[in-house]
Amino acid sequence: MKSFAKATMMVALLMASMTAEEVGDRWGTADREREFYPVVQVPIPKNLVIEAGAFEQLPDDRIAIGTRRGDIFFVSGIDAERPEPKYELFASGLDEIFGLSWKDDALYVTHSAELTKVSDTDGDGKADLFEVISDAWGYANYHEYAFGSKFDQEGNLYVALGLSASYHSRALFRGWGFKITPEGKSIPIASGMRSPGGIGFNKEGAVFYIESQGPWNSSCSLKFVKEGGFMGHPASYNWYQYAPGLKEPVNPESGSSILVEKEKVGELVPYAVIFPYIRMGRSITGFVLDKTKGKFGPFENQIFLGDYTQSLIMRATTEQVNGVWQGACYPFREELSTGILNIQFTPEGRLLAGGTNRGWPVRGLKPFALERLEWSGKMPFEIKEVTITPKGFKLEFTKEVEAKLAGDPATYLVKTFTHKYHQGYGGPEIDQTEPEVKSVRVANDGMSATIELETLRKGHVHEFDLGALRSSGGGELLHRHAYYTVNEIPQN
């Protein structure tokens, strides 16, 4: 027993050392974040291991939780002021659950090997019917994860499949995206995925997935899942022969850029939102759209995303310019207790987060946890949203800005960078520039400012540092940075 305890302590010390060395710097904003978005621990019974990989809100307002170990729990009481939830085991025997969606009195469960419809036909609270909806893909390696969306308005589900051992496509359709129709037809719609972390929708209902940093991906990114599209990693080209109606793209050239290769490889879909590595996460995971109608604060219709390695949550916004999706990402809340695998809004508009610290270095010290973020009702001073204009950007804020500072171009620090598009693992930020802010126009209500830049750089992330800005009451921004990925520039 003593040797076991000693071994456990050594593992803990090793993980702590790896975290300090490898995870990266904190934002340093957690103390201020607590005032606006406190974190409430959701208790887990000592006899349960809840490594949450998927959530779903049930019609009776309970929350379904799917776990890494293949269990599904129905949980009540999560929204109580002081939660003392009740956990009921609904199903077990599945594998690495990363998708739950409720329809027609059943859960549709995306796990490594298949999409399964799980039902309770006799009403005793336990699943007794497991029906295969789709097993159109192969599964032979522990790293071959499968991520599932919620249902879209037409009743389709979407699945994003990780590669074999993170580098290869040895099992059928690994590295592909699928659409599963209401009739159960499995349609391969996009190749080129590497290591997805989640799949879902933006406010317009377009399908996006999270891609992890690695080969052909110099940083984590949010990507639009275009039907017939190529998402960037050519390892999965070998399955085009089983994808009727889709044409195999030409091979991209390693060491080039997305902009250049897009002209050669017409199917290539550019990153919609690039998350600067370490500054904005290292292993981004599940995401959810804020449809709480203001219960969670001023970010309605924005995307919230978890990060596994750094145990934090971020925001993202998207817009379509010249038919191409692009947008921005923003810091939100750090110092959660474990590696975040997925998040879900509760019926009362709180944000539930869960995950594990298994497998890779994680900042959060708990092996698993459930936590609830809630808006205190106090309005934070934040960069609410960044959108592009023909000559610069419009910056919206959650509070009125101080007019003199907001009207001074020197208040706005802008830098840009890009990455190589190459088969190597990750990659540094290159081709950095610092475009001059030529002019600023502040809105009459003080809630936005439109800046004109010396130049806009297609294919570059535009990084904003607004640390000098103040609200009309003299307050500093809670988070001073935002990062916008420019794929296209509007004409007017």
Image (spheres, helix red, strand yellow):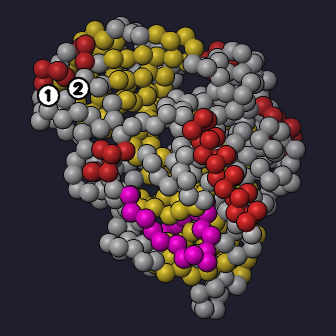
Q: Secondary structure at mark 1?
A: loop
Q: Amino acid at mark 1?
A: Glu
What residue lies at 42% left-to-right and 77% top-to-bottom?
84
What residue lies at 61% left-to-right and 74% top-to-bottom?
48
What residue lies at 52% left-to-right and 72% top-to-bottom?
44
The residue at which mark 2 appears reads as 469
What residue lies at 39% left-to-right and 30% top-to-bottom?
482
The residue at which mark 1 appears reads as 402
Residue 298 is situated, as x and y percent measured from the top left of the image, at 28, 48
Choose the circle earlier in sequence order: 1 or 2.
1
On the image, which quarter does residue 449 sit in?
A: top left
The magenta-colored residue range is 39-59
Q: Amino acid at mark 2?
A: Leu
Q: Secondary structure at mark 2?
A: loop
Residue 232 seen anywhere in this rendered image of the structure: no
Residue 257 seen anywhere in this rendered image of the structure: yes
On the image, which quarter does residue 409 sit in?
A: top left
Question: Depth check: 183 or 345 in front?
Answer: 345
Neighbourhood count class around disc 1 (C-alpha, 10 Å): few under 14, some 14–19, many 20 upward: some
On the image, which quarter does residue 83 sit in?
A: bottom left
Neighbourhood count class around disc 2 (C-alpha, 10 Å): few under 14, some 14–19, many 20 upward: many
Q: Give the spatial CA distance, label 1 vs label 2.
A: 8 Å
Residue at the limit of the structure toward the front, as seen here: 2
269 displayed left or right of 164: left
Is residue 322 inside the magenta stretch? no
Is residue 50 inside the magenta stretch? yes
The N terminus lies in quadrant:
bottom right
